[in-house]
Image (spheres, helix red, strand yellow):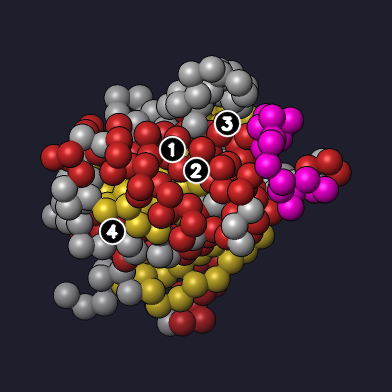
Amino acid sequence: MSQKLIFAVDIGGTTCKLGIFDQHLTRLQKWAIKTDTSDPTGRKLLKNVYDAFVEQCNMLNYHLDDVIGMGIGVPGPVNFEKGIVNGAVNLNWPSKVNVAQLMKEFVDFPVIVDNDANIAALGEKHLGAGQDADDVVAITLGTGVGGGIISNGKIVHGHNGSGAELGHIRVDHDQRFDCNCGKAGCIETVASATGVVNLVKYYHPKLTIQSQLLPLIKQGDITAKDVFDAAKVGDAFSLFIVERIAQYIAYLASILSVTVNPKYIILGGGMADAGHILIENVKTAYHQLAFTPSQENTEIVLASLGNEAGIVGAAGLIKTYILEEE
Ligand SMILES: [Zn+2]
């Protein structure tokens, strides 16, 4: 087969990352354009994306005839079968946008759309920390908590697309903090960057040990990063907080290990960049918690693609759902 091309798009609130890959997912080009949020129908944004690919192909002497398909990641809930996004706050899309259909006005190759957490998981499965496995789970620990489950090489969507909405598993049964979803006690309220701050505010009045964080807490501008940095140098209160967070993540991991039995549970996102201190605590708690047979050969690892996971996963949509289906 001569060189075929895959177009990959990772749409974010401020920039759209774009990439051109070959059929083996070797990246040939990557660049970014500004996200146009002025049009709530989404048409303008998608036209800009299409124009950017045409311009890039002209420069590189690539032909649209060689394109196998376009994978698109979007920050919002997606109907995978139909390629419809059910609103995306960050893009100023208040209601449904049929991304696949709009893009098909410009192109005649397949267009596949999925949410950003799912494509990040698929990216890690293809070229990242899960690349030798068909069963992986990626948990993104950022401002919120997102998740993607790859089972048998395919993304788990479930019957209405809510499969792998891992951020909304209730782990805090006391329901101390409200969640954006309308409920309380979701893992997002205790194991995201926001969750770290929630826990600090909750526990610090009960604090009986010295902590270097006290001045920051009193000023009211403590961040998750401060807590991880202090934990790394042995601050006892910060270590206590990190252990709490690790318990919650380990609990989620133990549920996943008996439901999908992944080879890898991959932790990514800004919080995972804290690295060793969090992952070691998660591993310890997980081994105490999880069903022993389901733990065998399951590894908890850090994501390896960083911000690239989305664009790789968008290309991965075409490899997984077009090329490997043939
Ligand atoms: Zn929730």
The amino acid marked with disc number 1 is Gln
Q: What residue is pinned by disc 3?
A: 189
4 or 2: tag closer to the N-terminus: 4
The magenta-colored residue range is 200-216
The amino acid marked with disc number 2 is Glu
Q: In the image, is residue 57 part of the stretch drawn in magenta?
A: no
Quarter of the figure with residue 24? bottom left
The amino acid marked with disc number 3 is Thr
> Mark 4 to mark 1: distance in Å?
23 Å
Q: What residue is pinned by disc 2?
A: 243
Circles 2, 1 touching at the beta carbon (< 8 Å): yes
Circles 2, 3 touching at the beta carbon (< 8 Å): no
Q: Nearer the viewer, residue 115 or 83?
A: 115
> Mark 4 to mark 2: distance in Å?
25 Å
Using a 10 Å C-alpha cutoff, classify the residue at mark 3 as few (fewer than 14 neighbours), some (14 to 19) or many (20 or more): many
Residue labelled 3 has its Cβ within 8 Å of some atom of ligand 1: yes
Q: What residue is pinned by disc 4?
A: 130
**Comparing labels 3 and 4, the label whose residue is closer to the camera:** 3
222 on left or right of 253 = right
